[in-house]
Image (tube, grey):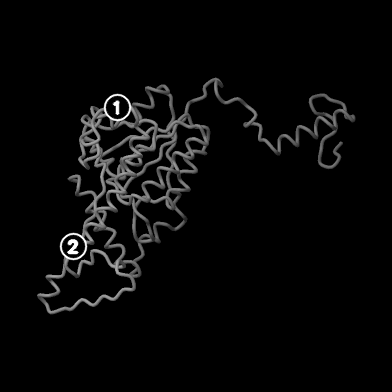
Amino acid sequence: MWRGGIPVKGISGLVAGPQCHYVIAMVLRTWRSKPPLKWLPLVGLPGKRPVVNVLRLEGPIMATSRFRRGLSLAGLEPLLERAFSTGRPAALALVVNSPGGSPVQSALIAARIRTLADEKKLPVVAFAEDVAASGGYWLACSADEIYVNHSSIIGSIGVIHAGFGLHGLLEKHGIERRLHTAGDRKSMLDPFVPESEQDVKRLSALLKELHVTFRNHVRERRGDRLKSSARTLFSGEFWTGDRALALGLVDGIGDCRSVMRERFGDNVRFRTIARRQPLGGLVGRSMVSTDGLADDLVGAVEERFLWQRYGL
């Protein structure tokens, strides 16, 4: 017989009665609030395979838009949340392949990784592929350990500003530059006017401040593992993986699969955390739009410049 959707007899041989009704109600209430699998102590169950979530951080680091690729906190936030929350991973592996880019986005992403790692109490290990330099190394330092390939490009702990001076070209073609500002420092290093000593001093001071922030981040994350002088480490130079290991910038030579299998056993399972493609995504990418072609072109040039600094 059923009362209110709850069977009152015939369950495991129990006879319907007040005590039976109470037990059934409590079981159903617990079932709805906590699915049965969450009751079980997963660690130590026979045949339970450790899982490592893998998140790729690939490309230049910059504020992104519809037509500009790259790594930014806004674009990575959903992936980071999933990487730390999906399943019950034994560790998170960050596979880094980035030539750097925006110091702001580098700092935001790294800070978010550390916040989630502390909240979830999950170890994070970074694995550099071709390049983890400048902002890419900043991201790698957000991990507890860093592993690289013998030939990976590592380091470039510095800040760079690049531009062009086009005032000579304008003069040659009889073009006059007209610039009006409210505030004598509103304009700085305008490429269409001659470079001024005052602007260069202001830019140098700004770059030094950013450099100090980068250096402090590396010191905080690497600590006593650093094995060379600040003059060497923070010169902006970059090195191969072997040399970076000798300098204490990384912890070892190895790739994600080999290191994680050595640490968690050959039966470790890797779960890749990737962006979900929306339905019809392929169609959307194949459509031609002129709305952001200029932005897209500038972004492509910036990306190419970042990679070419390291011979790639």
Residue receiving disc 1: 252
Numbered circle sitting on residue 164: 2
Res 181 → quadrant: bottom left
- The numbered mark at residue 19 is none
Q: Secondary structure at mark 2?
A: loop
- Residue 186, position as x, y percentages in the image: 31, 67
Residue occupying the point 37% across, 57% down: 64
Residue visible at 87% across and 26% down?
15
Horizontal side of 130 relative to 71 (left or right) equals: left
In the displayed structure image, the side of residue 46 where residue 11 appears, left or right: right
Q: Neighbour class for label 2 at 10 Å: few (<14), some, many (≥20)? A: few
Left or right of 24, for residue 145: left
Pick the front one: 209 or 78: 209
Residue drawn 37% across the image and 34% down it: 221
Q: Nearer the viewer, residue 110 or 168?
A: 168
Tell me the residue at 28%/40% (across/down).
Answer: 132
Residue type, label 2: Phe
Q: Amino acid at mark 1?
A: Gly
Residue 88 vertical position relative to residue 190 in the rendered view, above or below: above
Closest to the observer: 32 or 203? Answer: 203
Q: Earlier in the sequence, mark 2 or mark 1?
A: 2
Name the quadrant of the N terminus: top right
- Spot occupied by residue 31 in the image (x, y as percentages of width and height): 71, 35
**Element on which disc 1 rests:** strand
Closer to viewer: mark 2 or mark 1:
2
Picture coordinates of residue 147, whole percent (x, y): 31, 31
